[in-house]
Image (spheres, grey):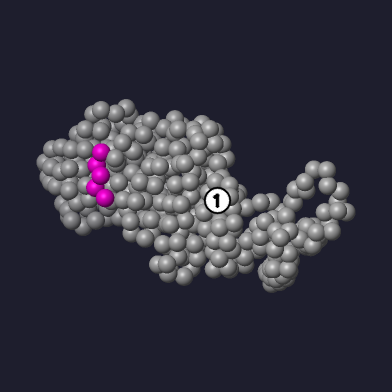
Amino acid sequence: MKIKLLGVFVSGAFLLLAAVLPSEDVVLPNGDPMGTLLDDPVMAGLVAYEEAVDEFRKLENPSPAARLEHRREWRDRFQKIIAENPNSQFVGNAKDQLLSLHNGLGEFDKSQALLQEMISESTKPEEKIELYNQLGIVSRARHLGSQEQSDSQKAQEAFEQANELFLSLPSEKRGGSTGGDQILALCTAALAAREAGNQEKSATLFRSARELFQSSTESAMYAASLDYDVEIIAELEMIQWVQVKEESNALNCLEILSKVPSPRWSPSYYALKYATEWYGKDSKGFQNFVSNWLDNNAFDERTPILMARLGFSYFDDKQYEKALPIYETLRDRHRDDFQRLEPKAFQQGNGGHYERVVADLVEIYSQRNEVGKTESLMTELTTLLPDSSRAKMLKRLNPSLDESEWAPPERASYLGLRIFSAVLGAVLILLGLYLNWRKRL
């Protein structure tokens, strides 16, 4: 589950980069005739670029080399146009396109320098926020390739600058796409802090993103349209608080996760994740937490998995009297639930959690000399999961569990046939002896 979420946020960072970059369509000022606008060399270049892009899109399956060559050609042309016409009213549009080309070519060092220049020239807070967030994303992308600490530091500083400016905006300007972009930027900043080893800062940034999501319906809807929601953010925040041992904050996230409407994962899933991460090898702490959770929370889809893990913990600590009722409940009431929750495990010949539930029950009943229950469970285990490694292990560890005592139904049927054949043979022998005796009379 960690690898998948990280992929979501990495891709989300580049979605944000695309979202804040202007489109390739240049918006012309109203009322200006096209001919007059094209007298401006920068505008002429922008229009020529649009036409070139349209023509390139008509090509069938252009090679990667052709794509790179197209980008390099226009990167060089825009650099020249900007240098020769610094006072054009459209130079900002040209720099936007140049920035997009640098990013497309992976020239993140050039993107960083251009963004710094654009930030220094900007006078609008909203525009500066976008540019700082872009600088953070570009610097983080460069860090992923270079692994240079300076790039990681640049990313964090840029995100911090963007957030300070965002918080200085009037509340009415923090909603909609501005707030939605900021949610994504905060999450990306949190990941950057986590990668830099600053877990507490990462947790704080995730919290800021979550609180912004919860405070603005418009921002939340915009972020959700890019596949970001409170469940993803709160889960990552919870794990970060666990890492820095901030129990109250971590439990607050768990509480939020347990109340998410229509969640991807049920509350028991997150309860198990919290307990596993928080308690580690502290089995008693794990047992107390999970037991209390089960007592005070409603049954949900993954409660059987949580119950099984509690049973395993008791069994590993040799508290068989506590494991037994949990296992018996799971076997009697929830076998179908396990087959639904872990279908691949059953298809591959091992029953996942349920296989261990039954195998542990065999050991418990065997220790208690409850032969009938032991044989019944071995029959179930080998019938349901004929290739069960646990069944084979139990047989090796318990030679007294003779195969004839727990044979699956198909083997039992052959046993009956052998008994019938033996009886029939004995009858025929007796009949032969009787007939031979009659002949002698």
Q: Which residue is mark 1?
A: 128
Residue 81 occupies quadrant: bottom right
Q: Is residue 203 above or below residue 87?
A: above
Name the residue at the front extreme: 87
| Residue sitting at x 73%, y 55% | 89
Say whether residue 124 is left or right of residue 325: right
Percent of width and height locating residue 195: 38, 59
| Residue sitting at x 69%, y 68% | 83
Percent of width and height locating residue 232: 43, 43
Q: At label 1, which amino acid type do we have?
A: Lys
Say whether residue 110 is left or right of residue 202: right
Q: How many marks?
A: 1
Q: Is residue 326 above or below residue 108?
A: above
Q: Is residue 228 above or below residue 259?
A: below
Q: Residues within 10 Å of mark 1 (few under 14, many from 20)?
A: many
In the rendered structure, which segment of residues is drawn in magenta? 244-248
Q: Observer-nearest residue: 377 or 157? A: 157
Q: Main secondary structure of the magenta part?
A: loop
Percent of width and height locating residue 411: 33, 48
| Residue sitting at x 44%, y 30% | 261
In magenta segment, residue 25: no
In magenta segment, residue 246: yes
| Residue sitting at x 69%, y 55% | 93
Which quadrant: the C terminus? top left
Q: Secondary structure at mark 1?
A: helix
Q: Taking the image as drawn, is residue 404 in sight?
A: no
Percent of width and height locating residue 56: 78, 62
Q: Taking the image as drawn, is residue 213 in sight?
A: yes
